[in-house]
């Protein structure tokens, strides 16, 4: 292998041409890589939606969801099934088993199972869709009135907003980067026929007569072909309405005497829009919002720029409409990438400065130019692997910045050391390749063994951070190849043929670094004499630190910090009208705006819905609910530098005071929390209580809720089981109805038409499909007395009063029935203040205080949310760590052919863990998923230094040096490269660890943990590793004597 490597060193032209080609390919790859906020991940979730118009939650559960769930049991590769049953629709979410390379066969099996399910008459065809992140949101565009946008727009004002939004939508679809434009607050046009109950009674006209007449009149039908004198003519009957007013003169009832009742005699006709089910608001104004999504292959920054340019160009054409671009995801991407790039540049500068200080100008320049070369070559592989430029991949590059020069430092420093000993340049480089090839290869295998298991972590979190180990491994492999193939050629070109020898007779380095070497020699001489005492001291220190960490170091899955968005979910009592909810939210918006003040970027209010996260299709549309999104200025730009958590507390306190002062209703409830960065995880506290009966489920939930409400630091305790709106239920008197010539269906359809509206027919006009809807006017639909005025037309055409054939009662049911794995489930959720407690502590306390197993034997409680995510992540990391240790041990066992020597090399790993814990405690940071990720990754980097020390010790012993002398000399000779590789790695991480110049709170724990762990382990390793080696020899000597 040394001969092959020497070929590249000696044939510099061939090497230069080969390297130039790789660099050009890397530049092309880098230029074509897409930029995104976060990496695309597969969610392994499939959603089944089945509309069943008119179905109650109980009926939906019994007739739709349960039959579907039973069929899904026959499908393999399903991990969990959840269903949400509410009025008119069943939503089932299927969780697929993790690790499937291709989910399409499982999705097809689910579709087959759905098709086999026998659904009730009236249920619409189910839709089956896999949740993916193929498309990403780019920008939102809001359309409001420039003049007084705070009031609900009139029909004509809304028409103007809608037409404007439609024009923008059409233009945005012309952009090749745009995959979809989603509409919010965009209501369908309709021709509304409002039949007056008094007029209907006076003219003896039934609602179903109007429906039938309009349906039969609105016809545009081909009627065949007529052949006349050799020419064909198409026959078509045209009776379709083109405008709403045309319907006013349509005859509803008439006879041969000329008597006629036209539609205008009993109803008014309007060209209008559907009633709003959600009010969309932006900064206090009522809006229509277009959400723009990019294609899978588009660059998010380019897509955003194209969309914004299109919007800006069109704004001038609509002077009466305020057009605002917000939620620009590219802004966050640019800021995050710029922050990480600044960290990268700062780290690169510090690394180069450290190289210059320790190695001098010539060697530092050679190694510094290796950094961009390695990156460019690595980008070719990164691009080919489908990894994009995003927060995760950029951070991985920052993290590997110092590590990537380790191999080059070892090769360059060893070559220069041999030249200082008197060898010629070429011989020194060849001998270096011979000396370091095996240790470098083994080191790379060890580091790879540490990082590789992280590639296979399960769950959404594992997929989310996949880019970190992937990018680091790619860069380190390229770094190894570069240091062995291309760097020797550079050294052979730019180093002088010979250098002045600077080593004394004892091989002790001269110059300023010699002072450090001599101090190290003296320290090691003393430590070796008292080796057992020193090893004992290190051991006591290690276990003492573990004890302190167990007592004072909390665990938080993803610590808060740097958030710039607050999400608020509000509740009014069930049954609250949308209009009343709007009135309350108008007041709440003002209070929230007052609290945030100048730090507010925008406030988005969606009245009538709890907006679900993108990976959970749980329906949230209810007239008593609202979602408020508060966008703050970036934390580094805030005047008061307050965190989002502080604003969360301020908003919660202000809303509470408003309730106490009567500004907001006492029954108004709210959940306020900062939107965390990173992968989607569950609520800090989320209990899933499963069982057959709601009464017992509510009792169990009440136990946990009472306990949670008494815990300090726990807030926003909620239960997802809500009583539904009060129902007015009609019961038909079968005998009376039969005598009157009516069926139950006749009664139900008449009531639905009067109060909800029924579609008589529809019209296609342009891209709009306009429904003709018949119902009572608003003033009649909002009165209980109107029920008595409903007349039902019987099979003889006569009108029968509703109150004669039916009676009604008032009852309540549940607004939504949730199920999980074939059983009913309710969820108790809460948020925690991490300054006072953690989700882990809260869940442990609940498990300790409440045991339902005796009193509720058919019921179970599962602690999900962040607790479940934390447990799964911890398990994956422990498995990864154990696997890494096993593989590293096997590699070193093969290399050294000695179990005891392998144990010496791996003896420094626990002190890397100690360094992580010490660093976190000193900085007041909790133990988190990212810091645990650092512990696993550290193991490979730590043993790289111990490997070199042990290898050189054994080489010197083979050359005839005694044990004591070989141990000290090996440490002295390898002191500079060991310190230099550690210093460059740590310095490369300092900017992201300490936020120089800006901090990314998501990746900071990993940088901080890795830097402190490596630094601490290296300093201890330089002393501990030689002592362990000596202790190993003592042990073997005793065995030989025995």
Image (cartoon, helix red, strand yellow):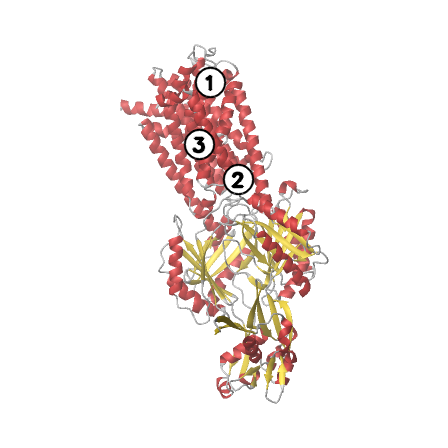
Please state which of residues 165 and 36 is positioned toward the viewer in this rendering: 165
Per the rendering, the mark at residue 476 is 3
Per the rendering, the mark at residue 493 is 1
Furthest toward the bottom, the residue is: 257
Please state which of residues 60 and 722 is positioned toward the viewer in this rendering: 60
Per the rendering, the mark at residue 435 is none
**Vertical arrangement, residue 727 with respect to residue 676, above or below:** below
Q: Earlier in the sequence, mark 2 or mark 3?
A: 3
Q: Earlier in the sequence, mark 1 or mark 2?
A: 1
Per the rendering, the mark at residue 1003 is 2
Q: Residue at image x 57%, y 74%? A: 239
Percent position of residue 216, x then y = 54, 77
The nearer-to-camera label among 2 and 3 is 3
Percent position of residue 129, x then y = 45, 57
Q: Earlier in the sequence, mark 1 or mark 3?
A: 3
Image check: 616 left or right of 670?
A: left
Q: Residue at image x 59%, y 58%? A: 184
Image check: 754 left or right of 882?
A: right
Residue 954 makes an appearance in the image: yes
The nearer-to-camera label among 1 and 3 is 1
């Amino acid at each position: 292998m040394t001969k092959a490597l020497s070929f590249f060193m000696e044939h510099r032209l061939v090497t230069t041409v080969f390297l130039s080609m790789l660099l050009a390919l890397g530049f092309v790859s880098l230029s074509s890589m897409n930029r995104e906020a976060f990496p695309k991940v597969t969610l392994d979730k499939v959603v089944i939606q089945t509309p069943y118009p008119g179905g109650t939650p109980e009926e939906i559960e019994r007739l739709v969801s349960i039959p579907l769930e039973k069929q899904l049991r026959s499908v393999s590769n399903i991990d969990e099934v959840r269903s949400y049953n509410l009025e008119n629709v069943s939503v089932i979410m299927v969780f697929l088993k993790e690790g499937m390379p291709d989910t399409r066969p499982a999705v097809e099996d689910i579709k087959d199972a759905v098709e086999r399910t026998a659904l009730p008459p009236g249920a619409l065809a189910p839709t089956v869709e896999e949740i993916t992140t193929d498309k990403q949101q780019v920008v939102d565009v809001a359309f409001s009135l420039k003049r007084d946008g705070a009031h609900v727009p009139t029909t004509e004002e809304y028409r103007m907003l809608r037409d404007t939004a439609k024009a923008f939508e059409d233009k945005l679809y012309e952009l090749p980067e745009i995959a979809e434009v989603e509409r919010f607050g965009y209501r369908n046009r309709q021709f509304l026929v409002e039949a007056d109950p008094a007029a209907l009674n006076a003219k003896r006209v039934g609602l179903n007569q109007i429906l039938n007449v309009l349906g039969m009149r609105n016809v545009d039908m081909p009627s065949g072909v007529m052949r006349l004198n050799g020419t064909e003519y198409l026959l078509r009957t045209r009776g379709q309405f083109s405008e709403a007013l045309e319907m006013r003169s349509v005859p509803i009832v008439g006879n041969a005497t000329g008597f006629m009742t036209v539609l205008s005699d009993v109803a008014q006709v309007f060209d209008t829009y559907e009633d709003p089910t959600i009010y969309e608001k932006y900064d206090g104004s009522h809006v229509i919002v277009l959400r723009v999504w990019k294609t899978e292959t588009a660059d998010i920054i380019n897509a955003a720029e194209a969309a914004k340019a299109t919007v800006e160009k069109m704004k001038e054409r609509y002077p009466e409409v305020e057009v605002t671009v917000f939620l620009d995801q590219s802004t966050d991407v640019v800021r995050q990438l710029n922050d990480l790039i600044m960290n990268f540049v700062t780290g690169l500068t510090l690394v180069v400065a450290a190289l210059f200080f320790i190695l001098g100008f010539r060697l530092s320049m050679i190694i510094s130019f290796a950094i961009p070369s390695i990156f460019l070559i690595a980008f070719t592989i990164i691009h080919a692997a489908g990894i994009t430029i995003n927060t995760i991949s950029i951070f991985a590059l920052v993290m590997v910045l110092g590590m990537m020069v380790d191999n080059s430092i070892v090769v360059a420093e060893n070559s220069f050391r041999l030249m200082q000993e008197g060898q010629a340049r070429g011989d020194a480089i060849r001998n270096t390749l011979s000396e370091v090839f095996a240790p470098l290869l083994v080191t790379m295998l060890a580091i790879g063994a540490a990082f590789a298991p992280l590639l296979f972590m399960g769950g959404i979190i594992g997929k989310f951070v996949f880019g970190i180990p992937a990018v680091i491994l790619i860069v380190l492999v390229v770094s190894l190849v570069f240091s062995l193939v291309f760097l020797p050629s550079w050294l052979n070109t730019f180093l002088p043929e010979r250098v002045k020898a600077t080593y004394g007779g004892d091989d002790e380095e001269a110059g300023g670094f010699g002072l450090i070497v001599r101090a190290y020699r003296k320290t090691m001489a003393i430590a070796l004499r008292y080796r057992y005492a020193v090893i004992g001291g290190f051991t006591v220190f290690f276990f003492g630190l573990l004890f302190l960490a167990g007592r004072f170091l909390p665990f938080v899955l993803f610590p808060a910090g740097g958030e710039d968005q607050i999400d608020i979910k509000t509740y009014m009592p069930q049954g609250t009208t949308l209009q009343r909810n709007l009135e309350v939210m108008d007041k709440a918006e003002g209070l929230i705006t007052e609290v945030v003040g100048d730090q507010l970027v925008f406030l988005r209010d969606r009245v009538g819905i709890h907006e679900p996260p993108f990976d959970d299709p749980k329906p949230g549309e209810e007239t008593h609910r609202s979602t408020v999104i508060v966008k703050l200025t970036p934390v580094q730009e805030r005047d008061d530098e307050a965190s989002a958590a502080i604003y969360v507390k301020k908003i919660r306190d202000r809303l509470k005071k408003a309730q106490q002062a009567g500004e907001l209703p006492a029954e108004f409830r709210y959940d306020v929390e900062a939107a965390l960065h990173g992968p989607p995880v569950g609520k800090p506290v989320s209990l899933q209580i499963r069982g057959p009966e709601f009464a017992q489920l509510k009792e169990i939930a009440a136990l946990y809720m009472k306990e949670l409400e008494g815990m300090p630091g726990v807030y926003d305790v909620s239960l997802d089981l809500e009583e539904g709106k009060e129902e007015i239920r009609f019961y038909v008197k079968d005998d009376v109805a039969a005598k009157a010539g009516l069926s139950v269906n006749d009664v139900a359809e008449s009531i639905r038409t009067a109060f909800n509206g029924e579609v008589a027919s529809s019209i296609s006009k342009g891209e709009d499909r306009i429904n003709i809807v018949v119902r009572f006017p608003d003033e009649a639909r909002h009165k209980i007395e109107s029920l008595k005025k409903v007349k039902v037309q019987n099979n003889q055409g006569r009108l029968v009063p509703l109150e004669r054939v039916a009676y009604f009662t008032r009852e309540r049911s549940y607004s939504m029935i949730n199920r999980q794995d074939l059983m009913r489930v309710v969820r108790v959720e809460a948020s925690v203040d991490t300054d006072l407690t953690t989700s882990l502590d809260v869940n442990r306390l609940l498990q300790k205080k409440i045991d339902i197993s005796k009193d509720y034997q058919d019921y179970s409680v599962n602690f999900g949310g962040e607790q479940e995510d934390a447990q799964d992540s911890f398990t994956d990391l422990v498995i990864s760590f154990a696997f890494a240790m096993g593989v590293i041990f096997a590699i070193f066992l093969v290399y050294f052919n000695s179990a005891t020597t392998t144990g010496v090399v791996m003896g420094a790993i626990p002190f890397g863990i100690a360094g992580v814990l010490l660093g976190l405690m000193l900085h007041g940071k909790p133990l988190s998923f990212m810091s645990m990720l650092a512990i696993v990754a550290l193991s490979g980097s730590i043993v790289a230094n111990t490997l070199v020390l042990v290898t050189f010790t054994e080489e010197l012993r083979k050359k005839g040096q005694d044990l004591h002398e070989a141990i000290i000399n090996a440490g002295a000779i390898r002191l500079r490269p060991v310190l230099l590789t550690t210093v460059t790695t740590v310095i490369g991480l300092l900017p992201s660890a300490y936020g120089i110049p800006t901090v990314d709170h998501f990746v900071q724990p990993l940088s901080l943990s890795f830097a402190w762990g490596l630094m601490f382990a290296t300093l201890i390793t330089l002393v501990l590793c030689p002592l362990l080696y000596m202790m190993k020899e003592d042990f073997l000597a005793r065995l030989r004597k025995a």
